[in-house]
Amino acid sequence: MGCTPDGPGPFFFFGTQEPDSTSQKQESAFVEFNLPVLDNFFMAVAARHERFTGDLDATVYKVSGKYELTDNLSFRGSYGTNYQAPGAGVNPGEVNVGVNSYTIAGGDWRGATTVTATGIEPETATVWGTGAIWQSQGFDASHDFQLIIDYFDIETEDELGLLASANTIADSVFSIAPSGSGSVPTDRTALADCSHPLINRITFNGGACEQGVTTANDFSSITTEYGNGPGQHTAGFDVQANYSFPAFAGDIRLGLTLTKVETFEFSETVLDGYQLDPGDERLGTLNFATVAQSAPEWRANLNVNYGFGDHNLRFVLGYIDGVKDERYYNDDGSINEASLVPSGVQPGTSSPFEASYYGVDPGAWVAGDLHWVWDHEWASFTASIVNITDEEPPASRQEFGYDPRIGNPLGRTFEVGIRKSF
């Protein structure tokens, strides 16, 4: 392979890195005021200033309040800012060398260098919310009812992370289809756009980029950047409801918790003045290969609890909305069936494969659990049946074949326990 500066050497796959150490100093000042404005109106104000190693600092604050309109109805709200400083392991100007599998180069493993930006700053966030609380008796004087409805709005900026993957940069630069090809191929023959704003992040074999000649077969490494990137905005509703009443020899409590996300969007991503991503709404999608996790629109838990004497029985039914795999959808919301057809032919035949819809739109996760607790005077005994109906997790085109943030792959499980305090 050669050992020239522009070509892979003996450490092509296993990059070398000398030992290093990091440290960080943090100083802070904090102030808080509790303000009982009226008998039924309470406010709290707080502020904090932080200073970190590397001339980093942040000032954040929060204002919150609660107003009791009647004995049953209250309103609450808050507004504040927050931050997240770079960790001690984040060193401005640090260079890390590794490897990456490049799709545009037929999956070849080639060099990938990540440089930490010198002007890195803390992440910031603006958070506000408002809600109402209702507390009263239920259908009878011995019944208790509580309902809480909250609206939340969280917006982050300058999030710390990789501004662009090495594959994203490669796909952006090698974006010209060769003569005779109707689309940009991934077999190393795609031509480079030598005037692209990200061209200086490409290390070529044997010299500079030549328009119309240089292809995806001619680069050895790509340099990307870790620093302050785009932000996220999420907003939605939280609902909590509880109803309890005596029954037989004990008490029953019915409970519901529900979250409805209204929006989950990313702002634009820019590197070297080039817009890599204009930003988009990602609610209800898998968010594969991004800093975000799966973003279901609905989540809910329904629980029924019955306590009698030293015993307690609890049934929980969980629901998580399904997410679509955005990699296989067109801009108009239709499925890109061509991307679901594996290459090659079926074993032992000359017939091509048909489209596989595995994990593209897997549906929701619904599972019920049953728990029993016996608080005996000698010890506490517990027993549980998790995933009573033995549900399989929704399919997903990831390493495990499912999304571990949504479903549980264990199926029906039985658990027993004992706790003794001395």
Image (cartoon, rainbow, N blue to C red):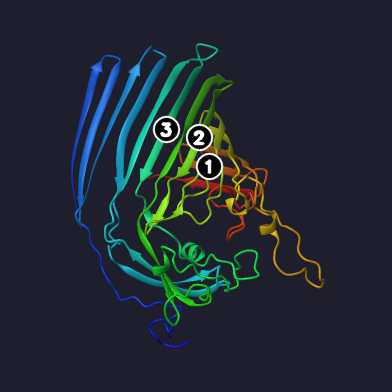
* Residue 31, visible in the rendered structure: yes
In three-dimensional space, the C-alpha distance between marks 3 and 2, rounded to whole angstroms, equals: 10 Å
Determine the image quadrant of residue 74: top left
User: Residue 349 has which mark?
Assistant: none
Residue type, label 2: Glu
Residue type, label 1: Leu
Q: Say which of marks 3 and 2 sits in front.
A: 2
Check the image and report above or below for 178 versus 135: below
Check the image and report above or below for 119 versus 113: above
Residue type, label 3: Phe
Q: Is residue 235 left or right of residue 388?
A: left
Check the image and report above or below for 112 versus 84: below
User: Residue 283 has which mark?
Assistant: 1
Q: Are marks 2 and 1 in contact (CB under 8 Å)?
A: yes
Q: Is residue 145 left or right of residue 59?
A: right
Q: Say which of marks 1 and 3 sits in front.
A: 1
Q: Secondary structure at mark 2?
A: strand
| Disc 3 target residue | 152
